[in-house]
Amino acid sequence: MDKLPVKMMDPTLAEMGNHLSDAMKVLESGKLESEQGKEKRKLSWKDIPGPLQGDGQDVVSILQLVQNLMHGDDDKLGQRSMQNIGEQGHMALLGHSLAAYISVLERERLRKLTTRILSDTTLWLCRLFRYENGSAYYHEDDREGLVKVCRLVINTLYEDYATEGFTMFSSKHPVIYQSAACRPGLGQHLCSQLGLPLSCLCIVPCNTMFGSLHQMDVALLDKLIREDRESGKVPLLLIANAGTPGAGHTDKLSRLKELCVQCNMWLHVEGVNLATLALGQVSSAVTAATKCDSMTLTPGPWLGLPAVPAVTLYRHEDPALSLAAGLTSSQPVEKLRALPLWLSLQYLGHDGILQRIKHASQLSQQLLEHLKTLASIKTSDTLDSEVSLIEALCMVEDELNSPVVVFRFSQDSTPSSGSSVEGFFARERDVLDVFNRWLGEQLAQQVPLSGVDVVELEDEGTCVRFTPLMTAAALGTQENDVAALVEKLGEMIPVLSCTLRYRQDFKDEVLQQASLSYIEDLSWPGLGGVRYEPRTTDLDENKREHSVEKINSDLLKKLMELDTDLYFSGGPEFCEEKNCIFIGMATEDLDVTELVETIVSIGREIEESGKLFENMTEVVRRGIQEAELQLQKANEEKLIEEGVLRQIPLVGPVLNWFSPVQASVKGRTFNLAEGCLDSTEPVYSVKAQMNKEASLDSPKSITKRFPGQKLFRRHGAGSDSVSDTSSVSQLEESFREMAHVRSNNVDEAEVPEERHVHIMEGMALSDQRVPEGQETESVDTLR
């Protein structure tokens, strides 16, 4: 926000605006703190509250504290989590500062100013959203307006409620009706705030046969109201949707309004589709909302305005009842809630408001057009099980698309012979739910400006939702972001299809291996999970569990080091199965058989090397004992061969000089694999040694690979395999860094079958006598 002009009627307002501008620049840029200050902050107990300083702090220090609290952990994450709120956002924030300043004006001037602000804002909103002769209530909590409206209806229908209170409900039980598709907890919040029992809340089911599955069943509602009136209850209020929180569908508001008029019941409407009332062309279903008794608007997310209140527009002729319900206030300060919205609406102007809402609607239409061309993308069933959401929305919304787009990856499959149809489809839905959750998370991560999220629908399951009316203004979503979203979606669909198709093949291959156990975990988005089971059966339960844990841990590390596009993991965070290896998404050219065989081969090598290391201590101990005995025997033989005279200090060297002894060197080699001592004669024969090594190191059979071909990929599987694999590489890049291992990495993990320790038993004769204790030193060296 630019500096406000200095020449104003009130210099305080100019100073306030300039200070706000400077403060926002400091907080958004994050350049206020020096490098030395950052180091001090890292060493300080910044998260622990401290005492209030006696001498106070200056503005810069306070802003520094606010900035540290806002961005304290962003240095670790490497990014700022705060989005750019823009010029219109600065106007909304200026409104809060002005409200505090205006509140200190003298009472009469404050009353005139707040009346003007409230009247202008209410008039603009009523004209924008086609709500004639309406009043407005501004509130921070978007549910608070509905609470006040309920109080108004209670005061209207129960004339003595102001004096008698809740005793009026004993003879005439009030009933509040809401759709099953309403946001969760709304009805319970109403009852809690109004002091009503939960029996006053009636949940109306949605359509089951005709119409959208997210629309209220009008015929059933009519039946419920008649039954309640016959039992002496009072129908109080009906909450309808113009854009359900999940799928964005609109109830049949025209029929609901007729029913409410017949039953003398209040109709309240809320939902994101109410924003389209400001456009030139509006569907007839949403247009009917202009005839309702009240509606709640949330212009903040629609227009990208931070910290602006929600607005409830209503029609009522008795100002006294509105005052009693809390919809109006005699306190001028309460009317200042509309000030941020009053400033922001003036800054945007009529055309700017329409442009933002229209832009969001066009983004939805753009995505819907692209979804028509993508295979395996379906949405919530509406009118018929064979009708897609794209066709159904045209029928339900009078051929005008809803601004909320909900889509889901789905693929038709048939149960195998001998399996339960109900159980198959239940498992199939769970798997598809996990895949769609993974799809939504990947799209949100790779195209963050699209604003997509994951939503759970009762009938359809897990879906991906695109609501530009709630996100586009704040994120700055543009058409190229939607195009990028469609492009990423097109790359992920083949990956999802191949993974879903290979899951059963992977399970069948694993079940054929005796050393592998298949792990059934429907919460894992990928091929599935396995566990390597050691072949040793003579271990107790604790040792076996420890062995399984160590082998599978090492196996997971080895698999993660392979040069492949597959993603290997220890499993979901809350997986019940332990010591498992889970394989991620697959591509068209995946060789499932080779994958399973590689897992078995590496697991067996790790198991065998583990057995060798477990026995190594005992083998070395026995070898040392045997070596000591043979060294002692060799020394005795040497003494007999050389004689006693050669061992005398003065006589021995003279005798050796006159008559040297030619002693042969006898060596021994220690075979760790067999745990025995052998002669070293074959070591000095080069040819024999080469033949022995050739017989030990037999060549391993490996699959022939073409240049550039990675593991577990079939050559020539299809022209699209390269693009599919590249997309998987991009998706799995966020999980781990791939490490390239040479072709002999498995051989390096093995312990050679024969590892030799050469022990020289004999020693060459010299002119000097061998010192005493040399035999002991030789043994100690061996140890």
Image (cartoon, rainbow, N blue to C red):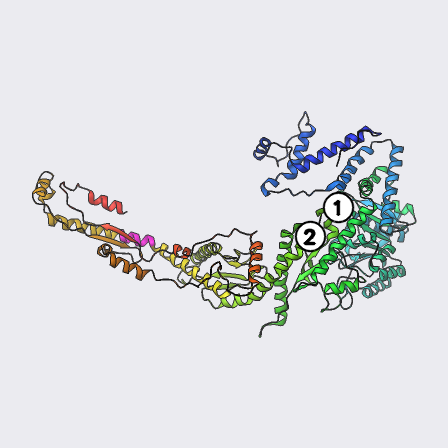
The boundaries of the magenta stretch are: 616-624
Q: Quarter of the image for the N terminus: give it.
A: top right
Say which of 263 and 627 sits in front. 627
Instruction: Locate residue 218, reporting x and y percent.
Output: 82, 64
* Foreground pick, 249 / 174: 249
Say if 48 sits above or below 133 in the image.
above
| Callout 2: SS | helix
* Residue at image mark 2: 480
Residue 170 in view here: no
Q: Is the magenta region chiefly helix, strand or loop? A: helix
How many C-alpha atoms fall within 10 Å of the one at disc 2: few (<14), some, or many (≥20)? few
Estimate how packed mark 1 is, as few (under 14), some (14 to 19) or many (20 or more) residues with alpha carbons within 10 Å.
many
**Residue in the image at 68% along x and 52% along y:** 481
Residue 463 placed where, x, y %? 67, 59
Q: Which mark is residue 640?
A: none
Q: Is residue 444 above or below residue 499?
A: above
